[in-house]
Image (tube, rainbow, N blue to C red):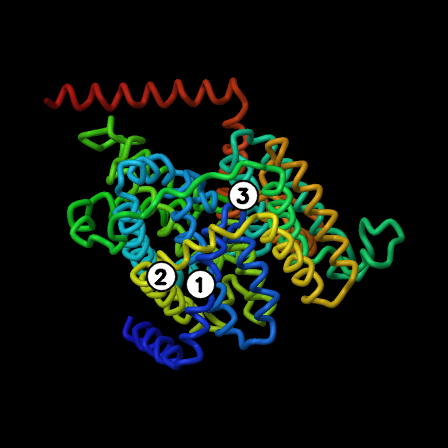
Amino acid sequence: MLQGLQDLGTAWLSFMNPLTLLYGLGGAFVGIVMGILPGLSATLAIALLTTLTIKLSANDAILVLICSYVGALYGGSRTAILLNIPGTAANAASCADGYALALQGQAGRAIGIATSGAFVSTLLGVVCLALFTPLLAEVALQFGAFEFFWLTLFGVTMSGSIVGGDPLKGWLMGLLGLFLAQVGQESLYAYDRFTFGWGELSGGIALIPALVGAFGLAEVLTTLADPIERKIVDLKDSVLPRWREIVVYKWTVLRSGIIGVLTGLLPGVGEDAGAWMSYAAAKAVSKEPEKFGKGSIDGLMAAETGDMSSIPGHIIPSLALGIPGSAPSAVLMAAMIIHGVQPGPMLMIQHPHFIYEVVAMTTLASITILLFGLFGVRPLLHVLKVRRGILMPIVFLLCTVGAFATASRLFDIYAMLFIGVGAYFLRRRGYEMAPLVLGLVLGPLLDKSLRRGLVLSDGSVLPFFTRPIAMAFAAVTLFTILLYVPPFKRAVNRVKSAAADAVRGMFARRV
């Protein structure tokens, strides 16, 4: 423990220089601006900044990306409160109560609640990040190829079943991502797969162009296809955070912070899940549930706390297992790999101090959003006055430059355009892009784990089902899929009802 505190102190000292602090403030500023602008997202912010920070040192580049990640989710609450449009998907739960407060002349108070809740909940998540990541990494050292195969498959299964309303669409997108990850030369024998004789495909579909296309170009097209322009609610009251409301709603903050971290640990469950689950839990235990959706401080605090605390929660499995918890953390993980840091169980051996550096980066990110929340709210809102007809071509240009900059391949621009246009039409049909991203990121790991396991077992598939940890992951994955088969789901519900009745009867007899 003392060694961990020493490493954390060393990491903090390494960031205490003007240039590094400027990088952090710059990353948070870009993230907040991207979050404020409807249609843009944290994933797009990280993807674009990854291409712009490619020449920086690993620590500086990842600091910029983490600050932009935190800033984008924080900035998205502005449009949720003032326009009733979530800046990012994670801020959707803040719309009802935030906008209702704004219509009541309390827009500044609502923004202050978002600032104080975001700051405290991110710090709570940072504590969990520092405590649980090293422990989870040590457990993951026991994993072999068989366990990682099922873990990656479980990640895609979870993303398909939780993101969006139709699990079949989610699983199809996850499988599409796994397929795209197999295109190009395979890792063992450099044999071309799914290239159809096209030499450009031998290098595979790079992750950054695919992400920029799926989230950047698709969002540009989606935004331009929506002609609705909404009027901003005027800020008449103070936007400074009211810290006494943190004390009044301390149990809401603590409960929502824990829920956000726990949802972040699940692969493929986005930050919006943390916000909605926290919101539902707050309404369930509230003494005034009728106020939710009509300007409830409790509801807004729960939503903003739940989404912000999920950010460190998503980073935990990314670092410890190499399994990204959400689409933004998938891009963040890709950036780490580009800068020579391989997340996963070997991280504690190859880069033992890096986890504490990420803890320091995330803490610095929470401080930067507090500074912007105190001093930069009104100036930043001028960004909303930029017409989308001017803004979106600029974003498209950045997407094109970002796709080309990573490898200087013209093919990457074509891949970005193809995937972006395809993602636009898929999104219009209700297909989510998060499972596609998870499939792209986890595809190489699944492929290597499967083939390595078959080599180790001399072609036998039995170890994939007989080793204890692998068997547990296989059972959970199969159970998750079967839950969406109606007869199996009805049987599970009957068992749950019988168990609940038995527990109630036992307590009744004791009383």
Please tell me which residue is depicted at 71% across the width and 43% down the height of the picture. 421
- The local secondary structure at tag 3 comes to helix
* Residue under pointer 1: 29
Circle 2 SS class: loop
Q: Position of residue 108 (x, y in %)?
A: 28, 48
Q: Secondary structure at mark 1?
A: helix
Cα separation between marks 3 and 1: 35 Å
Q: Residue furthest right?
A: 197
| Left or right, residue 398 beside residue 260 | right
Q: Position of residue 42 (x, y in %)?
A: 50, 53
Q: Is residue 50 above or below residue 41?
A: below
Report whether 78 appears left or right of 436.
left
Query: What amino acid is found at the position of numbered circle 1 in the picture?
Result: Phe
Most foreground residue, 266 or 460: 266
Q: Residues within 10 Å of mark 2 (few under 14, many from 20)?
A: some
Measured from the top left, where is residue 434 in percent x and y?
Answer: 56, 44
Upstream in sequence: badge 2 or badge 1 = 1
Numbered disc in front, either 2 or 1: 2
Q: Is residue 282 left or right of residue 261?
A: left
Residue 302 showing in the rendered view = yes
Tell me the number on the disc at residue 154: 3
